[in-house]
Image (tube, rainbow, N blue to C red):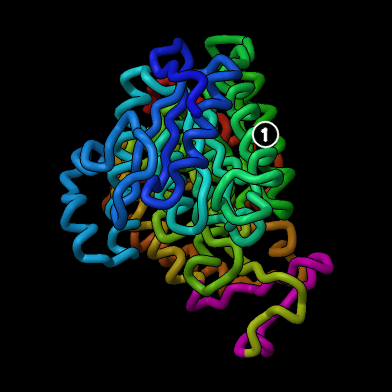
Amino acid sequence: MSQSRTADADRAVLLLGTLDTKGEEFEFLRDRLGLAGVGALLADVGTLEPPRGSPDITREEVGAETGVDVAALGAAGDRGAAIAAMAGAAAALARRLYDEGRIHGVLSAGGSGNTAIATAAMQALPVGVPKLMVSTMASGDTSDYVGGVDVTMMASVTDVAGINSISSRILANAAAAMAGMVLAPEPQLEAGRPLVAATMFGVTTPCVTRARDALEEKGYEVLVFHATGTGGKAMEALVDGGLVSGVLDATTTELCDDLVGGVLSAGPARLEAAGRAGVPQVVSLGALDMVNFGARDTVPAKFEDRNLYVHNPSITLMRTTPEECAEVGRRIARKLAAATGPVSLFVPLNGVSMIDAEGQPFHDPEADAALFDALREGLAGSQVELVELDNNVNDEEFATAMADRLDEHLRGEK
């Protein structure tokens, strides 16, 4: 069946497939990539049955990336354990091949098992490297598969089980899309501007807009991330990838959702990447007055007696309590105190969001005081610079002060 085996082409794609069940489908993808002028390295990540087809990288070679005993996995017959082990090995393989300049994108197709394995490998690569997953899981909640990077999910429509009139068109489109991404010339933008990441929410938009303008006037390129869980994950993935010079983390609201159980959590590791990497950061408390839920009727019954605010028909906000604010403050203090680079925490004493200002529905001086007190106590004796200003987070003076301080950190000033 094979028409082209150009794995030594200048531009090559890593194909990750469970060849114990999907040999024909991946041979088809490899051929379609070849027809488009793109090379392919086909890696077998199956474990339970002998491979169908001829991989360029055997399952044993994939497993060797992390010391996985593939034969033992197959003999155990534990599908969940096999998927977890091969996901880690595939991620190590993809990263090594990319670092060596041997691949320029990753393409895969399959059901839930192969989707878990292949997207783990895709998440190991930097933002901007083409990543395309044709999956039976693409129409549901794909957050675990996408993570904090630019994984593209494409619905397979039918199961990935044989080449037929539907699957052939879907897979051919996927191969053509991947070839187009890999062969497309990189955009040429103004070079030399340091990249700064910033976090924003609707209720902190004036703050971040003003800070962004100030930073751009100083010569920085500013990427703004919407603090909706995926936004925080994406920003931290860029930091981990070494692409960001500084962070203006004005909106740390995702920490509230992680603590209380809202729908916009970025996970327990939020606010750690910059500190771990030693990247200069200026942090604030934007939207720590709220936990996010969906439409009003989706708010859990246990929260019915809380201060709820219908932001729009799809979003309901819940005011954080003094106890929750104190715990968020303790968590922020621990994370920032562990930072290896310069960090300043800016505290807006007159409110952490638009609706936390005096006269607004979430104005709660007791809750804010619990947050501020926990931060003061947690950061006492640390290297973190604590800057308290008699402003609301959205005041121009506050936003400009944060931008100026981040600029000073980036220029090495104390």
The location of residue 268, given as percent across then percent down, is 41, 60
Q: Quadrant of residue 399?
A: top right
Q: Quadrant of the C terminus?
A: top left
Q: Residue under circle 1?
A: 173
Tell which of 400 and 84 is nearer to you: 84
The location of residue 76, given as percent across then percent down, is 20, 65
Q: In this view, does 397 lie above or below 243?
A: below
Q: Is residue 32 above or below residue 10?
A: below
Tell which of 231 and 400 is nearer to you: 231
In the structure shown, which secondary structural element does the residue marked by tag 1 occupy?
helix
Which residue corresponds to the image point at 33% horizontal and 29% vertical from the top-left?
56
Which residue corresponds to the image point at 43% horizontal and 57% vertical from the top-left?
113
The location of residue 83, given as percent across then percent down, is 34, 57
Q: In which quarter of the image is residue 294?
A: bottom right
Question: Is residue 311 one of those drawn in magenta?
Answer: yes
Q: Which residue lies furthest to the front in this view?
A: 1
Tell which of 265 and 136 is nearer to you: 136
Residue 300 visible to an observer of this rendering:
yes
Residue 370 visible to an observer of this rendering:
no
Q: Residues within 10 Å of mark 1 (few under 14, many from 20)?
A: some
Q: What residue type is labelled 1?
A: Asn
Relative side of 24 to 79, left or right: right
